[in-house]
Amino acid sequence: QVQLVESGGGLVQAGGSLRLSCVASEGTFRNYVTGWFRQAPGKEREFVGALTWSGYSTYNADSVKGRFTISRDNAKNSVYLQMTSLRAEDTAVYYCAAGRTLGSAPMAYSYWGQGTQVTVSS
């Protein structure tokens, strides 16, 4: 059982940066894959990237294009999504998730955070 709590969303100017946090308030990320997804109104949930416990990371190059980085702080039992060079099209609800296997589909993840809104103004 893993309970995830997200924070860090908000309003940011285009070109700015924002860091989202995902804390395992119950359970741990140990031996889990942590994924980040986002969903804009009327659109499908989109894979952003993922980080395995062993440290392997992968990103959706089509949407992120090298601007986002996932990291982990074991002492704080937290995973972060650092977003830079934000654009209006990055506006969405962002979700963190945990699963046993690495994948880009939401179905690969068993536990989800509540989501946090990121709004990028142009």
Image (cartoon, rainbow, N blue to C red):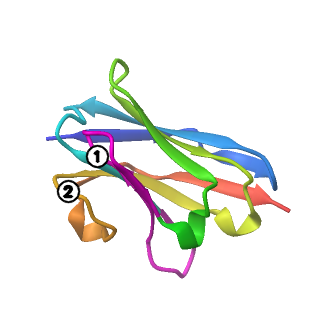
Nearest to the observer: residue 113 or residue 30: 30
**Mark 1 Cα shell of 10 Å, populated few (<14), some (14-19), many (≥20):** many
Q: Is residue 118 above or below residue 82?
A: below
Residue at position x 46%, y 52% in the image: 115
Using a 10 Å C-alpha cutoff, classify the residue at mark 2 as few (fewer than 14 neighbours), some (14 to 19) or many (20 or more).
few
User: Could you tell whether 100 is left or right of 104 in the image?
Assistant: left
Say which amino acid is labelled 1.
Answer: Thr
In this rendering, is residue 122 above or below 99?
below
Front of the two marks 2 and 1 = 1
**In the image, residue 21 lies at what x, y percent?**
48, 37
Residue occupying the point 20% across, 34% down: 30
Q: Does 51 appear in magenta?
A: yes
Q: Which of 71 and 95 is in front in this view?
A: 71
Q: Give me the residue at 28% from left, 65% from top.
A: 103
Place of residue 47 in the rendered image (x, y in percent of width and height, measured from the top left): 43, 66
Residue type at tag 2: Ser
Between residues 37 and 40, which one lies in front from this camera angle?
37
Q: Range of the magenta residues?
A: 38-59
Rendered position, 54 above or below 58? above
Residue behind mark 1: 52
Q: Which of the image's four quarters has the C terminus?
A: bottom right
**Corner quadrant of residue 73:** top left
Q: Which residue is drawn at 48% across and 66% down?
A: 60
Residue highlighted by disc 2: 110
Q: Quadrant location of residue 64?
A: bottom right
| C-alpha distance separating marks 2 and 1 | 15 Å
Q: In this view, does 2 lie to the left or right of 61?
A: left
